[in-house]
Image (cartoon, rainbow, N blue to C red):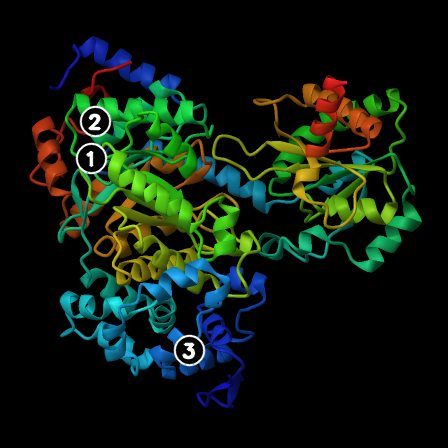
Amino acid sequence: MVITSAIGRERTTFDSVTEVLAKANERKTGDELAGVAARSDAERVAAKDALSQLTLETLRENPVVPYEDDEVTRVIQDAVREPVYERIRDWTVGELREFLVDSTTTDEDISAIRPGLTSEMIAAVAKLMSDMDLVLVASKLTVTARCNNTIGEPGRLSFRLQPNDPGDDIENILDSTREGLAYGVGDAVIGVNPVTDNVATTTEILEATRGIIDEYEIPTQNCCLSHVTTQMDAIREGAPADLIFQSLAGTEAGNDEFGVDVAMLDEAYELGTRRCSSAGPNVMYFETGQGSELSGDAHHDVDQVTLEARCYGLAKRYDPFIVNTVVGFIGPEYLYDGKQVIRAGLEDVFMGKLHGISMGIDACYTNHIQADQNDIERLAMLLANAANYFITVPMGDDVMLNYQSNSYHDAASLWELHDLRPAAAFEEWLEEMGIMHEGRLTEKAGDPTLFAGG
Amino acid sequence: MTTTNPPDDHDDRLDRIADRNPSRLGVGRAGSRPRTQTLLEFRSDHGIARDAVQSHVSDALVEEMGLFAIQTLVEDKDAYLARPDKGREIAAETAELLREECQQSPQVQLIVADGLSSTAIEKNIPDLLPILLDGLDQRGLDVGTPIFVTYGRVDVMDAIGEELDAESCLVLIGERPGLATAESLSAYMVYGPERGTPTAKKTVISNIHAGGLPPVEAGAEIVDLIAEMCDKQASGLDLTAADREFAKG
């Protein structure tokens, strides 16, 4: 299929929808490493122009990985509600952008077309949008989900408390949890990444976090982020997990690299709905991130924004409680610097919410990427009204995963800056504990010894 | 529900939490923001980590250690970070230079590469390299011309080993710095190096630095491993499999 653009000085031609999608991306090192990026800024804009004129039907008919070859494509295509799709199939991507940004278009209007969208359509429109477009639309979308509490309500911003320890030391994990709770974070989830991926450690972490939740009657949920099969084994043996976690990729081959497939995720979801210790109904937690498919050589010459959107298309199948992109973790060969990380963060949260999933972000960076704490504080300020939640670690320093994210401190700053509150039930609990009063931290806040222990 | 400890106990407990925990706990706050000193310590640790990535190994060290210096296809630090593929490969002229100037077909080809921390090289190589050269010599292993590679990734040892027809390769490379230390070094080893050798066929010892596995101890472990690799003619998972065979037999 030959696709052309007449914008700029000369006529530009492209050979396929996949090529147009890739070249229409804002600049990312990962697309350059994959050899799919635009060769110049002029070509990049020509690709955006060509993409703006494609219809949603063209995108539906040309999935980036063929239907026969890839189960993620099949999940996305089979989930489309045909009568809704019929109503919008003739829209161009440019028209979709103008519909989304229009101030008379409401959250309900967008919800009404959502079942007709595929992940490729959502990725396509993200590529046409400026940073402000992305924040504007993501901020007007409300996506709520419920586990032990409700996340995503208007005026509320939640946080994952991430008390990781390099030795899986339970007392250290609990002290970090106590400190985070004292700063008012933890309403999205108290979620621990274990060093050792086995049933014993997973069970121990789940029991410890469940212990403090029960002792102080905290309206939140726990999770241990080991491999999904490890969690399933632990749950079958009676471990108290409120959520089941797994990292996702946007292709079947990418998920194979993670050691999962749709059948396995279906089984985890089914187990979760029956055996998770939470109220539900939303019991799944997923993490994603641009570039993971290329790092596993599972990208099929597709750009990283489109593949990221497909992760959300897959996640949606499982009505997740929370999904977050781990945006700056992957390294400079995929997202080079603070500018690329910020752009990717805005794209991911927009695309996740347009899919209708409860979307958060781990605004983060490693030490070999050209970014620092200011970049991710900036990203958090941009997304405070758009994301359902952020990740927080003590003073921004995760000593287990060796990277930096937002600090426990940042939660109260974001609430203060944007006039936001924690999830309703959690806020009430913080008031009862004397940690928060009328949306602000009290004198007592920030002190881990508020909670008994070690 | 709340347990508030008496004031004296409170301070003791807070100290205990901060002291025993590797995370930055008990740091307090100024309003919703970190205290000034806490913030500056965090930024200082990140600055040290960044400097380790961005700085270069000094020519003086390369000369002092008697290393033959080459560069990968990478032209500068920016390209090094963005293009791992280029950091694994050397130019045809560089390969020719190696064949002219370095010993062919050594049993062990020793390589030092800057990787993601030149600080790790500067801090560990002066102690580690003499131990390795002595130790390998005592085992009767023929070590070729030690090489220093600027802008090198781990797999550059496959290209160098293939060009020099080495029986085995060892690369000492700076690890991605954490905030706790920027001095950590890794040693990757491969038997029968050739381009495209999968990671699973490589043996690794990591966390080599004064506060982790000290260079002197690491040196002894590396010598043992290389001797075993040459003896069993295997590395990585193949070596551990050979070990199991040996244990069974």
Horizontal side of A409 relative to B60 (left or right) equals: left
Query: Looking at the picture, which amino acid does disc 2 mark?
Result: Ile
The residue at 82%/21% (across/down) is: B135
Label whose residue precedes the other's in the sequence (1 or 2): 2
Which quadrant of the structure image shows residue A138? bottom left
Amino acid at circle 3: Lys
Mark nearer the N terminus (3 vs 1): 3
Q: Which of the two discs, 3 and 1, sits closer to the camera? A: 1
Q: Amino acid at mark 1?
A: Thr
Residue A405 visible in the snapshot: no
The numbered mark 3 sits on a residue in which chain?
A: A
Left or right placement of residue B191 versus residue A382 in this view: right
Write the residue at 37% across / 34% down. A232
Quadrant for residue B56, please give it: top right
Residue A220's tag is: 1
Q: Which residue is mark 2?
A: A213
> Residue at the spot x=87%, y=20% of the render?
B138
Write down the residue under mark 3: A48
Dot 3: element: helix
Q: Nearer the viewer, residue B46 or A384?
A: A384
Chain letter for mark 1, please: A
Quarter placement of the C terminus of chain A = top left
Query: Label 2 neighbourhood size at 10 Å, few (<14), some (14-19), many (20+)?
Result: some
Q: In this view of the protein, which residue sits in the foreground, B115 or A24?
A: A24
At numbered mark 1, what does the secondary structure look like: helix, strand or loop? Answer: loop
